[in-house]
Structures are given as C-alpha cells and as structure tokens.
Image: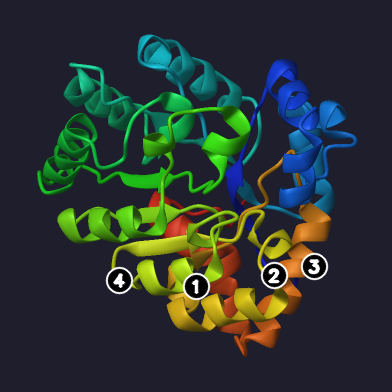
Amino acid sequence: MAMKVFDSHLHLFNRKIIGNVSRCQEMVDLLQLQSQGAMERLGPEPLALSMRQAGVAGGLALPTAAAADVDRINALFLEKAAGVQGLHTAGTLHPDREDSGEQIRHLCRHGVRAVKLCSFSQGFALDGQKALALFDQIEAHNLSGEPTLFVVLDTFYNAHRYFRTDPTHTTVPAQVTALTRRCPHTVFIAAHMGGLSAPFDQLWSDLIPGANLILDTSNAAHTLTRDQFVAMLRRFGPQHIVFGTDWPWFTHRTEIALVTELTEAAGFSAQQKAAVFHDNMVALLGRSESNG
C-alpha cells in the first residue's frame, strides 16, 4: 500500500511574488528554488493536479498579510481551500491588530487550526512586545478548552539581505526556542527545518528540541547538506518532523522521493516515515485525511 502523504507547507502565490523572487538570481541559487516553471504552477488548479498525480492526500496553504489585509486574506484563502479536495488553510494574524482575539475566534469558527506568521514580510520582530502579546493570546486560547491553534513560523535567516527588510524582523533559531518555552501549550512548526540558510552551527546550538516544537522539511533538503539534514532528523525524531514541499518552488513527486531517501538514511522505520509524511500533521489538524 502506498504511503499516505500530507503536504504541510504550500503557497498560493500571485504572479507578482513569483516574479519578484525569480528575478533575484542570487537568492534563487542560494535556496536552489525551482523558479523555472513556477509561473505555470500558480493557483489552485495546478496544485490540485500535482497533488493527485503524486498521490498527496491533503495539504496546508500558508497565507500571510499586512495588518490591514488580515481579514481579506483569511477570507480569500478559506475560499481557495474550499475549491481543492484535501486542501486546508492556515489563517494569519498580525501583532499590530488590536482585534486578534476576535480573529482567533473567527478562524476557529471556520475550522482553521493553524496560524502562519512571517515576521520579515509582515514587518515585526518575533520577540517584540506586540508579537509576544499576540503569542500570549494564542497560548491563552489554547488553555481555554476551545480547539487549539498551532503556529507556523517562517525562518528565512537571510531575508533582510534579499528583501531589504529590517534585520530585527528576521526570525533566528534562538527566538523560536524562546517562544516554545514561553508558550508551552502552543505547538510551533519552524518551517524549513528551523532556519532556512542559517549557519548550521547556529541552528544546531540554538534550536533546542522540545515537546511543542516541530520542524517542516520544506526547502531544507536543498540548503542543508545531506549529513546535516539527516542529523536534524535524528536529533528531533520522527514525531517532531512534518513533510512539506514549499510549493510552487518545489514539486510533490521530486520532494517526496528526496525526503523519503533522507528519512531512510536517518534510519526511520515505515511507521516513523508515516508519521513524518502524514500522521503528525493530520493529528495537529484534528481530522482524518484517509479519504483524501
């Protein structure tokens, strides 16, 4: 029987974002992005086709927005997700909003269980006062008895270099560890194995395994060496890793094959690979993807 797969890291970008990123050849080379053909992978229809062809049972779209656009983007992604079988969406929040409590309740009413935050593009410091207040709100919600939310954090270590954003808005591994300790009842997924393009010695020393910290595999197999990636798999263990592609920058069939080989190199059993590729994320979402 084929292994079930859930893609925990998908984007539904527009043409402007794809164009802006693709024109920065130095960044494309650094991250080994498959920018050629990315324009043809825009929108729900190519995503749905790719998922079907690769046997992917479900996926999680990850929106972010400026403070003024949070409501609009959340509504847009709920609509987009409804049009693709097996596709779920995260919501997004912003520390500058004064109505985040209502936003959290709104997302939960619509069955959303994840919040995506990208500090460099949204323009805030992960350890700033407003951001910490937002994380405290999410933690309080998760202690309230209502359906819990988990948080997906972007971790592009060199974001400020390529996007000319404030360096204090770049998420670094030590900040992720600090958040997991501040909010022990909130699960955090650190995208890209915790630090996309971060120096490996810093990633290894500052990103500390914990009960509420999960890493997603998206892009990281292209920026870490094989030995580094396998070492991270072994250090965090199969219950704290989820598979992700970073679609449309990478495609399903190639990423499934690549991460399968790496999990086997780490010595993961069939059951442990099932956890990475499907079961961990489905458990977080609190719903079955067994029917696709």
Kindly identify the residue that appears in the image at 75 percent across and 36 percent down. 47
74 relative position to 187: left or right: right
Q: Of tags 2 and 3, which is closer to the observer?
A: 3
Kindly identify the residue that appears in the image at 69 percent across and 84 percent down. 264
Check disc 4 and report its element: helix, strand or loop.
loop
Query: Where residue 123 sits in the image (x, y, percent)?
Result: 40, 25
Label 1 Cα neighbours within 10 Å, binned few <14 / some 14-19 / many ≥20: few
Alpha-carbon distance for marks 2 and 3? 12 Å
**Which label was assigned to residue 201?**
1
Which residue is label 3 attached to? 257
266 relative position to 51: left or right: left
Name the residue nearer the viewer: 94 or 165. Answer: 165
Alpha-carbon distance for marks 2 and 4? 27 Å
**Which label was assigned to residue 210?**
4
Specify the amino acid type for callout 1.
Answer: Asp
**Which label was assigned to residue 3?**
2
202 relative position to 244: left or right: left
Q: Are marks 1 and 3 in contact (CB under 8 Å)?
A: no
Alpha-carbon distance for marks 1 and 4? 18 Å
Kindly identify the residue that appears in the image at 16 percent across and 55 percent down. 182
Label 2 Cα neighbours within 10 Å, binned few <14 / some 14-19 / many ≥20: few
Specify the amino acid type for callout 2.
Answer: Met
Specify the amino acid type for callout 3.
Answer: Ala
Kindly identify the residue that appears in the image at 31 percent across and 40 percent down. 126
